[in-house]
Structures are given as C-alpha cells and as structure tokens.
Image: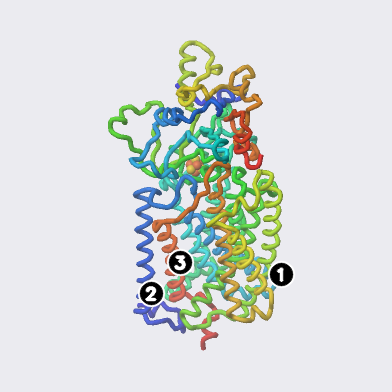
Amino acid sequence: MSGNGHSEHPESAVRFGMVIDLDKCTGCGACTVACQQENNIAFRPDESNKLRTISWMTLYRLENGQDYPDHRVAYLPRPCMHCDSGHDAPCTFVCPVNATKRDETTGFVNHIPVRCIGCRYCMVACPYHARSFNWWDPKWPETMEAMLNPEVSPRMRGVVEKCTFCHHRYYRARDAARAAGEDPDTVLYTPACAEACPTGAIVFGNLKDPHSEVAELSKDSRAFRLLAKLHTEPKVIYLSRHAWVHKQSDNGL
Amino acid sequence: MDKALIPDGLKRCPFPIFALWLLALLAVIGWGVYAGLTVLLKGLNVTGLNNYFGFGLYITVDLAIIALGAGAFFSGFMYYGISRFFPQLKELGKIINLAVIIGFCCYTGALLVLLLEIGQPLRGWFGYWHANVHSMLTEVIFCITCYAIVLVIEFTPIILENRKLDQVKPLHVFGHSLHELMALFALTGTFLSFFHQGSLGGVPGVMFGRPFAYRTGFFIWPWTFFLFTLSAMASGPAFTALVCRLIEKATRKRLVDHNVYLMIAKIQGGLLLAYLIFKGMDTLYWALDTAPSFGQKLTDFYRAPYGMWLLFAELGICGVIPAVILLTPKARENNHLLFLAFFLDCVGIGINRFVMTVQAIAIPVMPFDEWAVYVPTWAEWAPCVAMLCYGAVIVSLSYRYLPVFPQEKELNR
Ligand code: SF4
C-alpha cells in the first residue's frame, strides 16, 4: 500500500526538486503534453480561453525585447514550485480546510481534491499561477476515457488542481522497493515531464543529496529561482546563461 | 390582519402599495435565486471568474457589505458598552434596533452569497471540520457564523415586540428576558466582530506571494487586519444612518432626532480621520518599503483600468472629503453635505474592499506574466443585487410591523 510516509519518516533526508535548463529547452511542449496525459488533465472542446484552461505545466515564452537581429526568445516551463519557505508555502498557509499541505518528509506540496471546497484562496495566494480551477465537469472523448491513468484520480468540477511532481510515481517506486526488499526511503523516480523532455532539460531528484545531479545543478552559476525576492523558496530551479532571462525571473533583479 | 400587526399608534402606507413594493423586491430576488441556482447547477463557469481571478464580485460585495454591517457591532459596543462612561452615547438607543436589523441582513445575505462562491458548496461544513488554524479564512468562517447567530439572538426580541406576538405571554416574557441580556450579546458580538472584520483584512494581508496585498504587521496579524476593523467601524454606523435617512425619505416621516445623525457624524468623522492616518502610513510603508523589497514599485500596481484613480478615489474623494465634512461643525449641520459624506464614506470602503480583492490579483507578479482584467457576468450581479433586495425586504417588513424607531410617534405627532 502506498503511504505518504509522513508518520513513518519524520526525519527524512529527502527533498524532491527539479532543475530546468532553459538553455536546453526548445519550447517543444512535450513536457506539458506528457503531464496532461499522465495526470488525467481534462480539456475542453475549445481551449482558446487560456484563463480557464487547466494546466499543471505551463510553457511561457520569454523575449528580450530587442528588435532583429538582436531579438532572442526563450521558453520557460512552469510546474508547481512546491515552495519550501519556512512558514509554509503561500497556498498551504491559506487553505481553510487543510486540503493542500506540504509533506515535510518529501517536500511535495500535496493537494487533496476530495477535501477541497473550491474557495480558490490558494490560487489567489500563489504568485506563479500554478493552480487551475475545474470550471466544468471533466470530460474526455470516449476513446480517451479508456486511456486514463488508473493511478491518478480525475478531479471533479469545483475544485482546484495543480502539479504534484507526479507523486504517484514516487509511491509506486516505494511499493516496488518494498516488494524487492529494498529501503523505500532511498528510492528515486522521474516525473512524466522529465521523462518526456527530448533535450534532457528537466532533471529531477533529491535536492538534499549533495551528490545528486539535481543538487549539483542547483548550485550551477547559471541557476536562479523564480521570484526569489518573495522568499517562497521554490524547489524548482532554472538554469540560463542569459542575463536577460535572469532579469525576467524576478522583478527588478 | 395587516392593520392588527402594525405597532399601536403608528401610521403606515396602504397595504396594496406596500404589497407592490414587496412584489418588486421579490421579483429581483427571484432573478437572483435563478442566477444562484444556475451557478449551483452549472458550476462557476457561468461567472466571469477565471484562473487569475479566483476572487471577484461575490467576495468584494461580501467584504463591503460586512464592513457596512459593522454598524450593528459598533453601535452595540457604544450603546451597551461604553455609554456608561459617556452618557451622551445613550442617544444611539434611538437607532440601535435599525443597526441590528441591518447587521442581520448584511451577515445572513453575505453567507448566502458565500455559498455560491465556493466550487463545492456541499462541502461548506469542511471549514468547521477540517479547520486549518493558520488560515485567515478559517477564522472568518467561524466568526461570521457565530456572529450571525448573535445577530439572530439580537434580532429576536425586536421581532417579539410586534404587537400581536407581544400579546402572547410566554413570548413576551422570553423577549423581555432577552432584552435584559442584550448587553452581554452585544459585547460578545463586538468581540467576534472585531476579530472577523480583522480576519477579512488578514485574507489579503497574509498573502506573502502577492506584493500588492501583502502587509507586514504585528505578531501574526498583518496591518490590514487592524485597518479593516477600523474602516468597518468608520463606515458601519454611517451606513445605518444612510439607510435610516432613506426610510425617512421614502415614508416622508422623521424617525430619529437630528442629534443622532450629528452624533454619528462626529464619531464617524473621528474614526475616518484615524483610519486615513493609519491607512496613509500603511500605504506609504508598503509603497516605499514592502513593495520595493519584492522588486516592485508603486506604478507597477496601477494600470488601466485599475489605475491610480482608484487610489485617489478611495483615499481622497471618498476619504479626505467625507472626513473633512464630518469633522467641520458647519458642514455637518448641512443635511445635504452630511449625507453626502456618509455616502462617500461607504463608497470608499467599498472601493477599498474591491482593490484588496480584485485589483490585488490583477497584477502579474511574474514579469513575463500578463495583466488581467475582470468583468463580472449577470450570474454574479444578480445574486448581489438580490442580496440588497433581501435586505430591503427585511428592513421594510421590520419597519412596517415592528417598533423599530422608539421616537417615531413623538416626532410625527
Ligand atoms: S481551493 Fe481548495 S485547496 Fe485551495 S484553498 Fe480552497 S479549499 Fe484549499
């Protein structure tokens, strides 16, 4: 059985995080499609209203504001930042019904759709727009219903949802480790977006393990976080060698 | 039957006219109920809300109406609480019934609209069951419910004073006993109201990811906590006075002494001035310290249609002007200016609640994100307008059948 591990390992040395290399990202959108498929994200027949779409991984287009030939473009995939600030994430701090909580063992900012009352306070509090609301009943074309991922429950109308770092994959990996007689606390896994990225721009792992690739990359000289000045302490770290990209990460940085 | 219910010795308009008035109000309420049912059945996709604007008209109207309903708690506090030290405040007894009735309408109305606001209304009770003690909204949910109950208790003896009901002995005794206990309830209400008005201010103030709304503060309370309470105190009684004046105009009768209005004017003027001073200090500190520490400047937050004009309208036109009028003896003696000041005061608080909810989230925090504009749909307007009409129905029925104004007989001899 999958557990959240909270009561089992309160002193865990795990802090899952993600590094996204914007110099490698081509903006192909594979991560967003993989995320959509993996997490049973519903969609509308007409998705043109981007303010009502559900997107756990949004791809932003950044521009340097210069004219040709100095014009430059970069793409920034934005999952939930799984904020790690000491006094909790902006969203978990405000939810009146504890429907969204940070798992202090893994660092996942979890969301429990069946407890969510849909007050949207967490959406309002999140500066990254990482949460989407289910404005309609979820629907998939009939042929797609058969392809839904059985490990991720579809969400109902009237609740909020967001990226979970594909934590169902983590629990699956823990179960497999237990079955194989291994220590479930040391398992690693890969979320769907990282797996799908053709350029290897997304690296995922344990930020607390100094030898992990993700921890090493997070100390790269190109590393930066989105809106560092807000002190939400995101566990998603970006890499870019371009100053103009860094500049857009934080107002007036 | 209608005549038998009207308080002894008071004159009311003919029943058919009253019935027509009620019918008109009920028609609007019907429209609101239809909109509400549409929201409940179809979901919030019928509103103008979206992933940027999680909060919109419902929340703005709720916050504004709850602030304006603060006349109940603050008048109660002055009348039952501190009038023993300042006997002149006893004058407020002449309008206290109306303040309670308005408070009742505002709170119960706000609760009804809040039911539409949440995406899963059937789970509304989770707020009590799975309460997150760190969330300002939890405090709001608990305090508003408790305070609504207190208002029901405060309203009950007024209802029991109806001529027919009062003839029933047990009801008379019950109502009378409640009256005796009213000071206790009024002070409980004051305590509850103080906290939830503050928590409503805490809702934006604690959002440390939203530089426009976020405020530093005292211990766990952001400055908006105290500012919301103070602003509610500075506008609630003004709203009561305004409604009282409206009833006077509609019925062509005098219902309270002019002195009562003048006393409210003085109190509101003083509080509004205090509020403006603190609000000004808060705005300056936020603009010069908090926002820049997040890498943003004042002008980043004000763009069309939510431009600087909102700040001037809120603090200048609807803040400084009414404060000056209310604090200048000559000006407040002039009836037109007096009620204009009350009106501006109430509008200013409404703008403040709008700014702290809607404008606060229109602003993109990420530099590459987009500035958004929110336009409410009919499904949001209708329940809000219906809520006002619901209040009008309660006030109309109360005025017609209950002795709301103790001075009415003597002033209209
Ligand atoms: S929308 Fe759901 S998760 Fe978000 S704050 Fe409200 S109840 Fe909590």
Observer-nearest residue: B178 or B386?
B386
Please say if B375 is above or below A184: below
Please say if A143 is above or below A49: above
Residue where numbered disc 3 is placed: B391
Residue B359 in sight from this viewpoint: yes
Indicate the amino acid at tag 2. Answer: Trp
Indicate the amino acid at tag 3. Answer: Gly
Residue at 69%, 49% (x, y): give it: B217
Image quarter hosting the N terminus of chain B = bottom left
Q: Under tag 2, what secondary structure? A: helix
Residue where numbered disc 2 is placed: B21
Q: Chain of mark 2?
A: B
Q: Whole-Å distance between the Cαs marked 3 and 2?
A: 13 Å
Residue at 46%, 60% (x, y): give it: B109
Residue where numbered disc 1 is placed: B85
Q: Under tag 1, what secondary structure? A: loop
Indicate the amino acid at tag 1. Answer: Phe
Q: Chain of mark 1?
A: B
Please say if B24 is above or below B48: below
